[in-house]
Amino acid sequence: MHLKELEYELNLLKDHSLYRRLRVINSPQSSIITIDGKEYISLCSNNYLGLANHRALRNASIAATEALGCSASASRLMSGNMKLHEQLEECTASFKQTEDALVFNTGYMANIGTIQSLTTEGDAIFSDELNHASIIDGCRMSRAKVFVYKHRDTDHLRSLLSESKGYKRRVIITESIFSMDGDIAPLPEIINTALEFNAILIVDDAHASGVLGKNGRGSSEHFGITPDDNLLHIQMGTYSKALGSFGAYIAGPRILKEYLINKARAFIYTTALPPSVLAASMAAIKLVQQDENLLIRLWDNTRLFRERLKGLGFNTMDSETPIIPILIGSAEDTIKFSERLFQEGIFATAVRPPTVPEGACRIRTTITAGHTIEDIEYCIGVFKKVGKELHII
Ligand SMILES: *Cc1c(COP(=O)(O)O)cnc(C)c1O
C-alpha cells in the first residue's frame, strides 16, 4: 500500500529532526499573535513594516471588494485584466523608478516565470549558492546550464563566467537581501561583472522592497544604482512581505514586460489576482511613500535587537538587515531552542535543511516596525536565559 511508503519517509524525517508541521495562528498577523488562545511575540513573519493588518490596507481591500467583487475570474490574457492590475503596475513602476512593471501572483511564480522565459538549452545561468528555492526551481525548469557561485563571491562569479564559453545567453541571478542570512549582495560589483560579460542581471528584492533604501524602494535605491543602457537589470519584488499584502512584480524596461506577457508561463496560465489584493498592495506603496516613520522604526528596532543579541554572544552571522539569524548548528538543538522560546511566549521557527545547509541550522528572527522596545527587551531576556540553559552562549 502506497500510504505505508509515505509514512516511512515521514518517519525518516522525524528521526532526523527534519519533520515539519503547521501551527495555526488565530489572530491577525502583527507583532503579537495568538496560537491556541495564547499570545506570542512573533519573531518570524516578513511583515517588516507591520502593514499586514493596517487600517489603510484593510479599507482599500474592502472598498475594492465592494466595488469590484472577489475574483478576476480569468487569467490576465483572457478576461481577467482589470483596471486595478494596470494601476498597480503603474504605481509599482513609479515606486521602483523603472520604466514599467508586471504583476505576478506570487514571488515564486515571478521567479520561475521570468527565468524560464529568458533562458533555455544552450544558455547559462549564474546563481548564488544561497538563492531561494523559487530561483532554483526556475533554473531547473529553464533547461539552461546552471553555474552556482559561492555566496556573495564576485571573484568566483567572474571565474565561472570567464570559463563558460559558447553559451548563447548568460544570466546572473542573486537575491539582494538573503532570506535566511539577512546579509546583502554586493550589487555594484555584480553589475560591473554583468556589464563586463554582457550578462543579464536578475535581482530578487523579495525582502528588500519596502525595507532597503531611504524611501524603501529596494536594493537599487540602497546602492544608488541608476539604469544603464548596456545592462538588462531585472528587479523582482513582492507585495507580500514588507508591503503587507500579497503577490509580486517584475520591474524593468517596457519591452521586458511585453516579453514576459507573451512568454512567461507562470504569468499566462494562471488566474489574475483579485481586486482586494491589488488595492491593498497599492495602499501599501502609498503608505510607505507618505510615512517615513515606518522605515525609521524598522531600522531602529533592527539595530537595537541585533546589537543586544551580539552583546550576549550570539552568532548573528553577517546579518545587516531585519532578518537576524541566530546560528545554532544541529537540527536537534535548534528545535529545542525554538521550543523553549515558544514556552516563554516567543514564536520563532527553527530553520533546517534543505532551507539552509546541513550543520547551519538556525533560529531565523525578523524584526518589524510593529515591535515595541518592551517586546524587544522581553525577547532579549528570554534569549539570554534559554541561550545559557542550552549552552549556546
Ligand atoms: C518569499 C520569497 C520569494 C517568494 O515570494 P512569494 O510571494 O512568497 O511567493 C521569492 N524569493 C525570495 C528571496 C523570497 O524570500
Image (spheres, grey):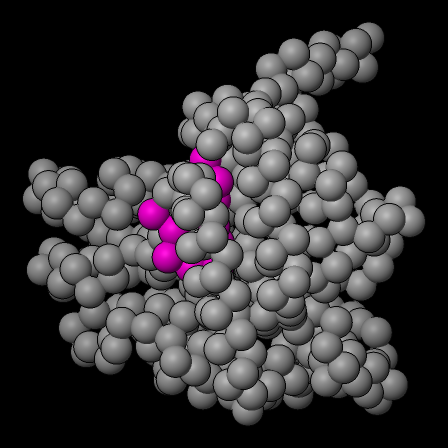
Looking at the rendering, which quadrant does residue 156 occupy? Answer: top left
- Depicted 91 relative to depicted 358: above or below: below
Which residue of the protein is positioned furthest toward the right in this rendering? 37
Could you tell whether 153 is left or right of 79 in the image? left
Q: Which residues are magenta?
A: 318-327
In the rendered view of the protein, which quadrant contains the N terminus?
top right
Q: How many numbered discs, if any?
A: 0
The picture places residue 303, in percent across and down from the top left corner, at 44, 62
Q: Nearer the viewer, residue 80 or 163?
A: 163
As for residue 325 lying within the magenta part, the answer is yes
Q: Is residue 380 left or right of residue 84?
A: left
Tell me where residue 274 appears, x and y as whole percent.
74, 73
Q: Position of residue 81 (x, y in %)?
A: 66, 78
Left or right: residue 336 versus residue 66 is: left
**Front-lying residue, 142 or 245:** 245
- Above or below — where is 360 with respect to 127? above
Residue at left 43%, top 82%?
A: 215
Query: Percent position (x, y) of residue 95?
Result: 46, 84
Residue 29 is one of the magenta-drawn residues: no
Tell me if residue 269 can be seen: no
Is 83 displayed left or right of 307 in the figure? Answer: right
Most foreground residue, 391 or 174 = 391
Q: Nearer the viewer, residue 125 or 32?
A: 32
Q: Residue at x 39, y 67 (%)?
A: 235
Q: Is residue 332 visible?
A: yes
> What residue sits 72% from the left and 64% below the top?
30
Which residue: 69% across, 33% down?
Answer: 340
